[in-house]
Amino acid sequence: MTRREQDVVAALAQGLVAPVPPLPPVGATDTIAAFQAALDAGPALNRLGLRVALRLLDRRAPRLVGERRPLRALEAARQQAALAAARGDRVLGPALEPLRGMVQLSYYGDAGVLRTLGYDPGAVVARATEARR
Amino acid sequence: MSAAALAGALPEPATRVARDRAVTPRIVRGAELRGSRTVTVDACVVGSGAGGGPVAAGLAEAGLTVAVLEEGDLHGPETLTARPRDMTTGLYRDGGQLVTVGTPPIVLPLGRGIGGTTLVNSGTCFRTPAPVLARWRSEHGLEALTDDAAGALFRRVEEAIGVAQVTPELAGENAAVVRRGAQALGVSGRHLFRNARGCVGSGVCAFGCPSGAKQHAGAVFAPRAWAAGATTYTGCRAERLEVERGAVRGVQARTAAGGRLTVRARHVVVAAGALLTPLLLRANGVGTASGALGRHLTIHPASAARALLDEPIDPWRGVPQSYFVDELADDGILLEGIAGPPDQAAMATPGQGPEHRDRMLDVARTASFGVMVADTGEGRVLRLPTRPARPLVRYDLHPTDAERFRRGFELLARIFFAAGAREVLIPLSGVGVLRDGDVSPLQRARVRPRDVKAMAFHPLGTARAGADPRRSVCDPDLGVHGVRGLHVADGSVVPSSPQVNPQLTIMALATRLADHLAAEG
């Protein structure tokens, strides 16, 4: 992803996850790297479609709530409002849907987020390793 | 069980509970194979999942030399991290991003690695129900699949993969909630049978079992094949079948390093799964005469509801798919458990922004359970004009099945409320959240296919078997009509939806094929 695309993913995460304590801010997680890994794992056609969707949402979602700035330049509350409006939009809604799942998975799969919600994969692996012996 | 549709579907528990001794893998990595290389064997098996695994093991143990071509890699339990997000990119084909084209779009996750989709399935085991076998005999001419003959095959498979019923202790609180609700309503349900030995309830079956307890095809049949001398070529994608004068001669594969591997063999068994097998056959102009190749696709569409409870249930503890409700099975509706860690729940939780976040903050006290329907309609698999070839899956949910989802969710919501749920979240557009035990919004709803948020895990039927070559791709012994030595052994050959999770069905059919080919020598 380009720097700009990374910024759009961060904006999407901010708008779609809307983290507040005890959840860590998006910047304190590995959301962007995980999204990149998911993008790399998919076929080229999906990759192309998702990148087009990123750019489309960055430019057009804010207009639905009267903003002229791109999504990545908005403050958190406006990002949430723009994406909420995009969800019901005939064109932007279908573009947002696949990104929604990927972004939420990328954020909630962060090790710190998992621990915050009570899941400790390290403990699962340790118990599994013991069971294999 | 109360459902006549599932008669004969419950497995018999395996008698042997210990795991097999570790076998040194006989693997040649395609990532290191450059240039051209040719090997000659008796049998080449394309794919190592529920179909390819048993065939390769059976043929190798019968004394045939066997080469297995597998596009993915070996994923041993020591490499698995219990983190769904990260495992999805490594263990699933296309990073889990395969989606059908149609109404609604349906995510169709498939495994990629030694073991195929069994590496990432929930491990649920059902035999093919007797009424389904009867239809296959009467409508498709699979007359050799009598209840007795099929029963003997199922027993062998169940013993091999350690099938056992989940205990209440391992089932986890997520299942306990539904069990409690079902019992309160007098609804028929029970713990599922699974292929696991020494399970400790890691809760991540669908993302690779880190304890090695799940007895998937790569953990059971691949080691048996290796012990009998077979070799698995990982990172190798079969691209061309060599067919001369009506008989198969071998397979050409592209390696991950850009090389070419040619396997000359008198038996070729294609077991690449119901989406890729038809592409491989069609690309080589075989199996096309009936017009059935790539058609008659069934997928068992599934969706899941979520219920907020007062007490923590930690849905990631215990076996994620450990209980089922068959109350509506006669109408093609099965309720089966589905649960997992928070990142998996994030994808399954509808909504966005503060609404989604607040639900995620309650994830530890949120139960989830699935509704799976037997397809009324059919889809088809087409080839995308890409290199390598990729499947384009056309599938439209039938309106009858949309109504089945409504009925399934209505029963599930009643079960959740009977178990004490405060609210139930239904993934059907226009229904949303149910509260205070009120399921009337679901009763009133007119659910259209586009209103359903679905996934599917069981693609079947795209090279179906049958006695009539005008209606089928493979004969009853799974040989491709008109091509000597070429067979198919995966979900493609299943003639119609078995209405239950299909791994035992596929393994039994593959075991029968191995017997048949071994007898030929």
Image (cartoon, rainbow, N blue to C red):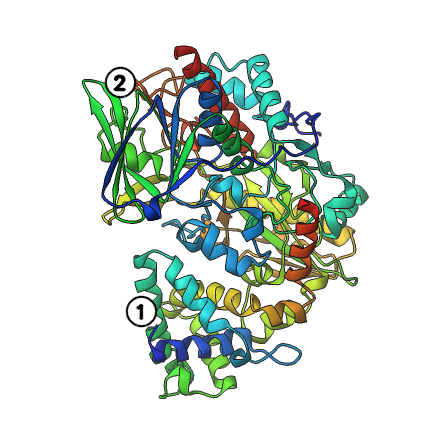
Residue at the spot 74% in from the left edge and 57% down from the top edge = B437
B263 and B415: which one is in front? Answer: B263
Measuring from the top left, give residue B270's x and y in whole percent. 36, 30
B265 and B136: which one is in front? Answer: B265
**Dot in front, 2 or 1:** 2
Q: What element carries label 2?
A: loop
Which chain hosts label 1? A
Do marks 2 and 1 both belong to one polypeptide chain?
A: no
For the view shown, which residue lies furthest in the left direction? B245
Measuring from the top left, give residue B133's x and y in whole percent. 53, 20
Identify the mark at residue A52; answer none if there is no mark. 1
| Type of the residue with mark 2 | Gly
Indicate the quadrant where residue A57 lies.
bottom left
Measuring from the top left, give residue B73's x and y in whole percent. 43, 46
| Type of the residue with mark 1 | Val
Measuring from the top left, give residue B182's x and y in whole percent. 75, 43
